[in-house]
Each structure stands twice: as structure tokens, then as C-alpha cells.
Image (spheres, rainbow, N blue to C red):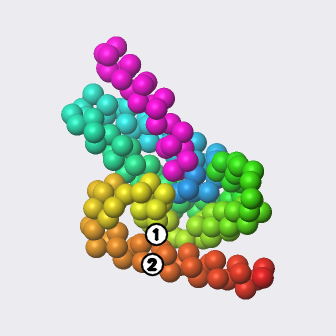
Amino acid sequence: MDQRDEQEFAEYFAARRDAVRRTAYMLCGDWHRADDLAQTAFVALHRRWKKIRDRGATDAYLRKTLVRASIDESRRPWRRERQTDELPEPVPDGPGLAERVATREDLLAALREVPPKQRAVLVMRFFEGLDVSAAARALGCSEGNVKSQTARGLANLKQVLEREVETNG
């Protein structure tokens, strides 16, 4: 890779690393794994940087690589343990702080209970804000698959949250 390509990649990395890390956290629920997943995605992107003709598609390529790495990693037997309950970022002070924190903790804990492919779809659709077709491209699957995985993922998420309410409330 020439100097100009290296500079472009360095600028892209600096601009996107925090967002990619947060997305990785939403996918796996652990900051250390999120760092590993983000690094894996950026290394793969760096290897293909010179071959990417449409720089507008870079985010989609990076998301797809991140999701695939997350799903591959979740299949490893030693990854079936439950991870830490850390929040991805601090919640600002203000009215209703206790309710927002409890809701956020519950949501993140419940999200970790959703199967990896359904979790990936939920993160792409509702955290990344992708529509069905963009999520399908990012995940490398059909739009119908995104729709069905979204429905199943939301149902599983609702079930976990309802179970938590019954247990704690």
C-alpha cells in the first residue's frame, strides 16, 4: 500500500474506531471482546483497502466483517460463558437517571441472551439504524432473513425482559 492509501486508511480508522467498538460491544456484551472484534474487522479492512473502489461502501464492508467475526467467535465453546455487565458508555446525570440506568442495564443484559444472529440483526437495525435492505447487505443474507430474524430477535428480547420483570419485580 502506498503512502496515500495508508494515510486514507489511518483517517478512516480514526474517524470510525469508536463507533465500530461500540457496535462490537452491542454484538458481544464485553469490552475486551469488542476490542478484539473491532481489531479483527479493521485488520481485514486494511488488507483489502487498496482493492476497495467504492469508498462509500467501506462502512458496509466493515459492518459485515464485524458481524461475521462476532458470530464466528460466539460459536467457540469457551465463549458460551456469560460476560460482564458493564455499560457501553456512561449515562449523563439528570432527571429520571435511575430509571434510564436500570432500563439500559436490563436491555443490554437481555440482548446478550438473544442468539448471536438475531442479536446481530437487532444491532444492525436498531443500533446502527440500517433499513432492511442495508442490514441484509451488511449481514450477507436476504431481506426476508433479516425480517424473520428481527421478528424472532424482538420476540426473544421481549421474553427475556418479561422474565427479568417477573423475577425482579
In the image, 87: left or right of 23? right
Mark 2 and mark 1 residues within 8 Å of each other at the beta carbon: yes
Q: Amino acid at mark 2?
A: Arg
List the residue tagged with mark 1: 118
Q: How many numbered dots are placed on residues in this image?
A: 2
Residue at 33% x, 45% y is 61
- Report if residue 112 is visible in the image: yes
Mark 1, other Cα within 10 Å: few <14 / some 14–19 / many ≥20:
many
Numbered range of the magenta stretch: 1-24
The image shows residue 92, relative to residue 81, as above or below, that is: above
**In terms of depth relative to the viewer, which is nearer, 159 or 80?**
159
Q: Amino acid at mark 1?
A: Gln
In the image, 91: left or right of 125? right
Which secondary structure lies at badge 2? helix
Residue at 52% x, 70% y is 115
The image shows residue 25, relative to residue 107, as above or below, that is: above
Q: Residue 138 appears at what percent x and percent y? A: 34, 54
Prevailing SS of the magenta stretch: helix
18 is within the stretch colored magenta: yes
Which secondary structure lies at badge 1? helix
- Which mark sits nearer the N-terminus, 2 or 1? 1
Which corner quadrant of the image does residue 57 belong to? top left
Q: Residue 147 appears at what percent x and percent y? A: 34, 73
Which corner quadrant of the image does residue 141 belong to? bottom left
Label disc, if present, on residue 152 of the rendered structure? 2
Residue at 68% x, 67% y is 103
